Amino acid sequence: MQAYLMAFVIGGLICVIGQLIMDLTPLTPAHVLVLFVVLGGIMSGLGLYQPLIEMGGAGATVPLPGFGHSLVSGTLEDIDKYGFTGIFSGALKATAAGITAAVVFGFLAAVAFNPKG
């Protein structure tokens, strides 16, 4: 039960921060998306995002900073395994499932709802 509560709190805080940024600054949702992915990557590179994941579980891995974390952690893992070539393969392997799911479900939604325009 505590894991669900922590996921809700951590994920909710990330969403609240994003909403406040959009409400209180001239940044658009696209700016906030990029900002959160980059911040997640920076925090991951500094070793600050993994403790947040251990505390919040899916509340920290599902939002946008979690994607940045996946990119950086996958790259660092493949650099350790394969050296220089890991720079090019790590991020793609770490995020392939999520990107594929987004493309497939986006396509299915477009087919099901027949968007105009």
Image (cartoon, grey):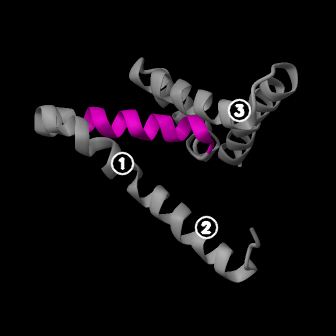
Characterize the local packing of mark 2: few (<14), some (14-19) or many (20 or more) Cα atoms within 10 angstroms: few
Bounds of the magenta span? 63-77
Q: Amino acid at mark 1?
A: Ala
For disc 3, the marked residue is 14
Characterize the local packing of mark 3: few (<14), some (14-19) or many (20 or more) Cα atoms within 10 angstroms: some
Comparing marks 1 and 2, which lies closer to the viewer? 2
Q: Nearer the viewer, residue 16 or 88?
A: 88
Number of numbered discs overlaid on the protein picture: 3
Residue at the image point whose x is 59% and y is 32% from the top: 34
Whichever of labels 2 and 3 marks the residue nearer the N terminus, that label is 3
State the predominant SS element of the stretch in magenta: helix
Comparing marks 2 and 3, which lies closer to the viewer? 2
Q: Amino acid at mark 3?
A: Ile
Query: What mark, if any, has residue 6 been given in the picture?
Result: none
Q: Secondary structure at mark 2?
A: helix
Q: Amino acid at mark 2?
A: Gly
For disc 2, the marked residue is 106
Could you tell me residue 51's position as x and y percent? 51, 27
Residue 75 forms part of the magenta stretch: yes
**Disc 3 from disc 1: Cα separation:** 22 Å
Quadrant containing the C terminus is bottom right
Can you name the residue that lies furthest to the front here? 117
For disc 1, the marked residue is 94
Whichever of labels 1 and 2 marks the residue nearer the N terminus, that label is 1
Give the quarter of the image for residue 73: top left
Characterize the local packing of mark 1: few (<14), some (14-19) or many (20 or more) Cα atoms within 10 angstroms: many
Placement of 105 over or under 57, stated as above or below: below
Could you tell me residue 29's position as x and y percent? 73, 36
Q: Nearer the viewer, residue 31 or 6?
A: 31
**Disc 1 from disc 2: Cα separation:** 20 Å
Q: Secondary structure at mark 3?
A: helix
Residue at the image point whose x is 39% and y is 22% from the top: 45
